[in-house]
Image (cartoon, rainbow, N blue to C red):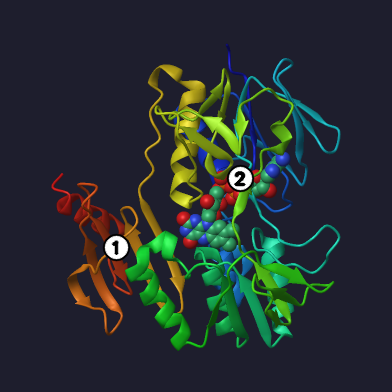
Amino acid sequence: MTMRRVVVVGGSIAAVTAIDALRLHGYEGSIVMVSAERHAPYSRVPLSKDVLSGASSAETAQLPALDDSVDLILGDRATTLDTTSRTVELASGARVPFDGLVVATGARPIRLAEDGQTGELVLRDLPDAMVIAERASHATSAIVVGGGFLGMEVASTLLDLGLAVTLVDREPPLRRLLGPWMASLVTTAAVAKGLRVVHGSGNVQLIGDPVDGVRLGDGQTLRADLVVSAVGDRPAAEWLASSGLPVRGGVVVDEQCRVAPGVVAAGDVAVVQRPAGLLTRSPHWTNAVEQGRVAAISLIDADNAVEARPDPYYWTEQFGLNIKIVGNLPGLGSPEILDGDVESRSALLQWGNSCEPVATIAAINYRIAVGRLKKLRAVGDGT
Ligand SMILES: Cc1cc2nc3c(=O)[nH]c(=O)nc-3n(C[C@H](O)[C@H](O)[C@H](O)COP(=O)(O)OP(=O)(O)OC[C@H]3O[C@@H](n4cnc5c(N)ncnc54)[C@H](O)[C@@H]3O)c2cc1C
């Protein structure tokens, strides 16, 4: 099929990377980007960190501007996809025809509030960050529900802003993401800075309308001026429900990010069907970048389609710790200390892994270029 017009639905890093890659790989046809957000594309990464704290302005989160040849439709949402007429319908009623389609609609936060219950705070986009910052500016206490990366970063920033912060989770914070050794190191730093960590078995329920607290599974209630839920997200794929495309949790892609002829998807909205039938999702920045690039190539140059291979690189900043990790989940035991020392919280660490031949390397408050960190892992791995 001649590809005269590519429509990219989504307005963030996966969409922008796909657009850059389309041009980089020689696509000269028309590109239309449709984003539900009113803002030009920006990065979510600083929203829980410097933007929420006020250390950086919202402008610093902007992604580099797209080239002038791209038609931007901002503040309008795709509501339906018709794969027969190859048209995307928008909330405004506009219909946007395409030859090729990139689905990059990301994810939406899971909410805990009951229907109609007001006042729950979540952090996914710039307006969310502005609302939390404004509420925090005349609050003295906060509850954060969820001890993953996002919840811990929000808790850390609110603590820095002078609030008394309680973090509630069913599990020890970060354990599933960072393994017990590293999770314990971060939690110790968090508690030393004043974070109160409360474990509650069972589901956490928001109480009050507007929300002003939580009820834990054991019946215990906690109150605070603001309550932020950070309990995960769901792919924003509901607009594809009647399209006939495979949607199981997220939109199902193969390892080359292909969904159907002339349709690809990338980033947080996508789940990858592995050859063994397993569906995997990787809602991280580096994955959105890699899938955006690969999706664009698959769309316009199918003969040279490549597998998406995101760098297993992730990072977080919280409670005075700047952590960079290359590799999979850090191992269960204590790491080997390659340099620095853990007591003073500046160290370069390595875990071997009995299940995989590849080591995991972590830098904590340790100045090292990401490229060097990746090389170290390759050396540890013997490759
Ligand atoms: C506060 C915060 C901090 C983070 N920090 C880190 C970090 O430190 N490291 C890291 O690796 N990852 C981090 N992440 C995760 C990372 O930001 C995401 O993995 C990444 O943004 C995914 O990019 P995406 O383009 O796939 O989706 P998104 O960023 O979710 O963008 C999707 C876009 O599509 C638009 N959209 C949705 N539905 C529609 C529709 N129907 N029609 C039109 N447009 C639509 C949305 O408005 C949005 O613009 C963080 C996320 C958050 C929220």
Query: What residue do we see at 39% from left, 43% from top?
Result: 310
Q: Which structural element holds mark 1?
A: loop
Q: Residue furthest front?
A: 218
Q: Relative to 265, does residue 126 appear above or below in the rendering?
A: below
Q: Is residue 56 visible?
A: no
Kind of residue sitting beneath label 2 = Gly
Q: Is residue 359 left or right of residue 67?
A: left
Circle 2 residues within 10 Å: few <14, some 14–19, many ≥20 = many
Q: Can you tell me whether the CB of the residue at mark 2 lies under 8 Å from the nearest atom of ligand 1?
A: yes
Q: Which residue is mark 2?
A: 106
Q: Which residue is mark 1?
A: 332
Give 329 or 62, whichever is nearer the viewer.
329
Q: Is residue 24 left or right of residue 119?
A: left
- Give the percent coordinates (x, y) of residue 355: 24, 48
Query: What residue do we see at 20% from left, 50% from top?
Result: 378
Q: Is residue 82 visible?
A: yes
Give 58 or 346, whichever is nearer the viewer.
346
